[in-house]
Image (spheres, rainbow, N blue to C red):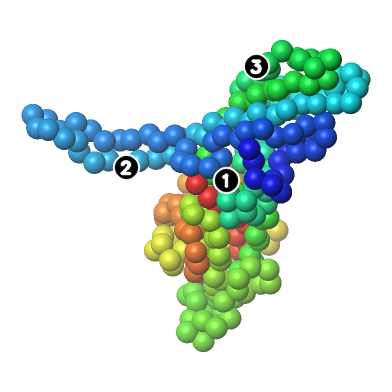
Amino acid sequence: MPAPGATIAYNGLALDTYPYALDTLEGLFGSPEIVSSDLPRVSRSGMVAGTDYYRGRTVTITVNVYADDATTFNTAVANLGRAFAAPLATPLPLSFTIPGIADGLAAILNLRPRKLSAPYAVGTIGGRSAQVAVELYATDPLIYSAAETVAAIGLSTSGVGLQFNLTFNLSFGGATSFGGAVLLNSGSATAPAVIRINGPVTNPTVRNVTTGQSLKLTTTLVAGEFVNLDTSARTVMLNGTADRYSLLTTPQWWGLVPGLNEIRYFADVTVASIATVTYRSAWV
């Protein structure tokens, strides 16, 4: 049974209030699927270790439907069918707060429905109760905080990045900092980010000092132009629509590792440019 105080909703339908009662929830806690690149050794026992990656995550929700009258029951079952109708082209967030998962914080997992079934005959008690199972699949297996963090970083006044005299002005998100910011990923997995670099700026670089990786663009953006770098999709989009991946001359795609991450923003010429880093804490 889900823990007391658990809340869960999908596609506008709350599954923790009358006429629904959560029965079981599988797949949110624990590791998602793993794909391994290990290779067998030639003419020897054992394997050559490769890199393991996460695949997707399957989540199964079992809900008890009960009602005081047939009309309420029929509506409840119909609403389940609408909320979990498949196929669905774009994943929707399963929103939940469950003690023990994502540190008990409000969280989301983006899922698509795969199967909806009623293992027990609908209407087992006078046509007013049923147990319905829903299977969903997440191609992105990470669980994210419902709250999104947006940090604004202005170019360093020196033009070469964060200097010693700016060390004590690092920001934890919210107000604009200059040259650098320290961003917190409260989760257990590396969190992707969307970085927006706003012109005017020449040859900007956004560096994660904590991981030692940089994203550098060789270009000049005028006032009013911007480039979005999506570290999950690994795309570079000018003004949000035009593919400009060729501008990325240092493609060291980084994410925010669990804990604190020092991020620096610098360019060839110091101007009034702002880079915004948008992300959600992430859990496996």
Residue 11 shows in this picture = no
Between 97 and 192, the one nearer to me in the picture: 97
Between 218 and 75, the one nearer to me in the picture: 75
Q: Residues within 10 Å of mark 2 (few under 14, many from 20)?
A: few
Residue 282 shows in this picture = yes
Quadrant of the rendered structure where residue 35 is?
top left
| Residue bearing the label numbered 3 | 119
Q: Quadrant of the N terminus?
A: top right
Between 220 and 171, the one nearer to me in the picture: 171
Identify which amino acid the numbered label 2 is placed on. Answer: Thr
Q: Residues within 10 Å of mark 1 (few under 14, many from 20)?
A: many
| Residue bearing the label numbered 2 | 51
- Residue 200: give x, y in percent of width and height: 63, 64
Outermost residue, left side = 43
Identify which amino acid the numbered label 3 is placed on. Answer: Pro
In the picture provided, is 29 more to the left or to the right than 66? Answer: left
Outermost residue, front side = 125
Point out the tag, 1 or 2, that comes first from the N-terminus.
Answer: 2
Which of the numbered marks, if any, corresponds to residue 198?
Answer: none
Between 13 and 173, the one nearer to me in the picture: 13
Outermost residue, bottom side = 165
In the rendered view, would you say 173 is above or below 132? below
Which of the numbered marks, if any, corresponds to residue 143?
Answer: 1
Q: Secondary structure at mark 3?
A: loop
- Residue 245: give x, y in percent of width and height: 50, 45
Give the residue drawn at x 67%, y 51%: 106
